[in-house]
Amino acid sequence: MDSIVIIFIAGLIGLFAGMRKQTTLSLIVAILGLIGGGLAAYFRGTYISPIQSYAAQVPTPPMVILLLCGVTLLAILGGYQRYKQDPEHTSDYFALILFSLCGAILMAVPSDLMLFFIGLEILSIPIYVLVGIEKGSSLSAEAAIKYFFTGSFASAIMLFGIALLYGATGSFQLVEIQSNLAIGIWQSPMAMIGSLFILAGFAFKIGAVPFHFWGPDVYQGASNAVLMYMSTVVKIAGIYAVIYVFAMVFRDSYFFWIDLVSLIIVASIFYGYITAWKQTSFRRLIAYSSIANAGLMLFSLADANNTNVFFFVLAYAVSSIALVVSNQANGENSDELSAWEGLAWKHPLLGVSIVLALFSLAGIPPMAGFFGKFFLLWAAAPNLPYTTILALIGSVIGAFVYLRLLLLALKKPSVSIRIELPIEQSIVLIICSVLTIGAIFII
Amino acid sequence: MALIILLPLAFSLLAWFLPSSITRIVGLISSFATLTWSVMQLLSFDPENTLYFDLGLRMVRFSMDSLGFTMVLLTNAVIFLIFLANFQRSIVHDKRFTALTLLMQFGLVGIFTSNSILGFYIFWELTLLPVFLILFWFGAFEKQKALLQFFLYTLLGSLAMLLSVIGLMHLTNQQSYEALLAADLNQLGNTGIWLMGGFLLAFAIKIPLFPFHTWQAETYTKAPTAGTMLLSALMLKMALFGLIKWVLPIFAGTALDFWRWPIIVLGLIGIIYGAVIAIKQQDLKTLFAYASLSHLGLIAAGIMLGDNATTKTAMLQIVNHSIVALGLFLAAGIVEQRLKTRDLSALGGIAKIAPRFAFWFAVLTFISLSVPFTAGFIGEFFLLKSLFSAHALTGVLASTTLILGAVYMLRAYQDTMFGPTQISTFADLHWSEISVFAILTIAAIYLGLSPQCLTEFVGHSLVQLKP
């Protein structure tokens, strides 16, 4: 059996188990499904689709599936406190997340544009629902509607791009598209416009400038628990897909799109970090930070054999999850940055993980974030020297955004308040901290 | 040998978990243990051979040569003295301080023993974390502006260095010290100049050299005494060490020829500018901060000459500056702690009430003035001599440090110790403070009488620069 099937079935079982209204049971089913999916990916290798007519392979590498499953596991554990508040729906939420994860695995490294598009939709639609689970909040409803409309629009653009590409090359299979493009078809206007449309769709999904505008509103409206999932898994799946499609398939038109990508990178980094500076809402800050990080991730397009992005997304994901979990521990669905004052003093584990996560995001060694950024820029520097320099300058601004948050969290309060951390949040924070600091041994 | 790096890290972690009530003893004992361990290693160390070791990291390897060993010993000694000097202050009762200082020691030892350029960079950045937290938690930073300014500067410098490190590793395909030495960077032409510029920017901000010094006075005055000691006695030395060990030998040739005189001129401006500003200062710590700017300008200018005899003297002067900085900032800290002010106009007449403090402060003042039989005398004399032989004008300008130094140091001493008594009580020195002053004095005089024990030891690992 394969990871997608296992995770999908775990989601289904979870739905049925949900009838018993036992939140722990749903959680256990979801965790078992994720672990099973991860193990299957690790031991069974790549996934061969049973759909014969496509004869399509999903060549997603085991490590990526493992990463996606692991991050989802962290997100589910971290958000469990929120999900169990509606016992009737807990299992629905977990099922939605697992279905969405199936889509993420399907699209992360596509071999066929049709299959890829299906994966993209399977990834997105459950998230539209999840964003709206705060039924009492108008912000949440607004976010869900906004995300749904803009997301559908982006899907349409992507589909249009795929159609144009099909028109130019006569195939959905990426291998065939690549070989057709290589003989010169890439210069045809249809193929060029198609690739630009696909790029725009991707930029939307990972939230890069100029298709970032949905990010802050949606992140702010979503609950902390959903934010953990959507700010990480969507980005990871999206960035792997964009790397595969562009650096592998469109490599012949490299010089056509790389300048555009450089522009997106620089604009995302500067826009994200500069705008993050003045935020008063924590989730908006995370949103802008994720825009800037999306820009950094796009650096992996600069070289063809990029295994370097793995570290970066891992570091980004664990740091973001640690921050959002800390925010959630501070108070259910709290969002104000002013609530962060003295947060690091409320629990020793919170203090350690906030310091590590923020230093990691700021890119200061020996945290994982530094190595991620270093390998990314290291590989990109020969191809995009000036973009690299600009990105580093942008990183200084970013470091200040994170340091500002850190100073706020570290300010020693006059009266010390202790908060209790639920066991599963402690586990998430410990895992995130260990991964952040342990990176030094992996390199 | 690996323990020399791991001990501070282990002690730092330990300090987090031990109760606050014994934390000052923990700090003192663990730093003393590290110091003892490094001295024991020194006995069996052969300065002619570099000792390689690694900690199981794939990309970062370590090596110990006599230059690095000198700096490691200096670090361990200074950290111990910082714990000792602050023994009766409230800051050492906080285990955050103990743990962070030991973490800082770990970072510094890592810098001085790293054998790959990437490791050098990683440890260089690692030291930011403890310094940042110490300044933030224990400093008197209103509105955090000074703290953020300090950070903006250091991060900009670090990123310039990161660019250079990436460029260097790409262009030479090497990252270990020996391989980089063997690589010929002259053929890179202007790229080499840019790469060296990135390193120099980072170093110029840390040292600090003249136009990049604006963070210094503000940060020193707002930092707690122990933090100022860490910054001035150790953190600045990272940059000088980087110059001596990494940048000069690697970039010797076109790039060094390009940057030599600009840096020397900046150093000279720093010497005179720092001294002149110091004369006008009313705040004791600010005064010492500018004095430090002046002294370090001389060292940096000397190092940039790039001949090994001068570099050896510069090493002597580096150690001497650590001694002086520790002593003077301790004195400033004592005044501040007892009287809650550092304003020279509000001070005066301490000598009558606290004769022991007056005596030791006088001794430190003279060490800082580089009177004969102290380490500074030999150091400054030979540095000035080398600058003279490089260019007479350079020597003349640099020599003003002797006169101007006497002006601001004696003025500072006079205004605090003599004159009309404006204060009623001043608790005389604690035994821990006396012992720090005594150790510093002994070290300065010992190095003044037999400087060759240090210069020869260091000389073993200095490479002949490529023409």
Image (cartoon, coloured by chain):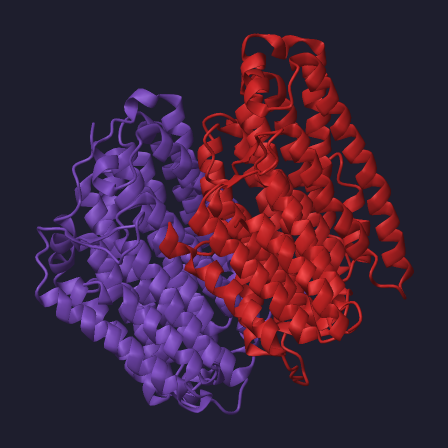
Chain colours: A red, B purple
Q: How many marks?
A: 0
Q: Residue A114's spot in the image, x, y percent?
A: 68, 30
Residue A260 in sight here: yes
Residue at the spot 34% in from the left edge and 49% down from the top edge = B120
Residue A224 in sight here: no
In the rendered image of this protein, does residue B310 appear above or below residue A157?
Answer: below
Q: Quadrant of residue B275?
A: bottom left
Relative to A356, B165 lies left or right: left
Residue at the spot 25% in from the left edge and 26% down from the top edge = B184
Q: Residue A12's spot in the image, x, y percent?
A: 69, 58
In the rendered image of this protein, does residue B140 appear above or below residue B375?
Answer: below
Residue at the spot 29% in from the left edge and 45% down from the top edge = B116
Relative to A118, A217 lies left or right: right
Viewer-closest of A363 and B189: A363
Q: Residue B357's spot in the image, x, y percent?
A: 37, 83
Viewer-closest of A288 and B201: A288
Relative to A166, B409 lies left or right: left
Q: Residue A379's spot in the image, x, y percent?
A: 45, 34
Viewer-closest of A317 and B141: A317
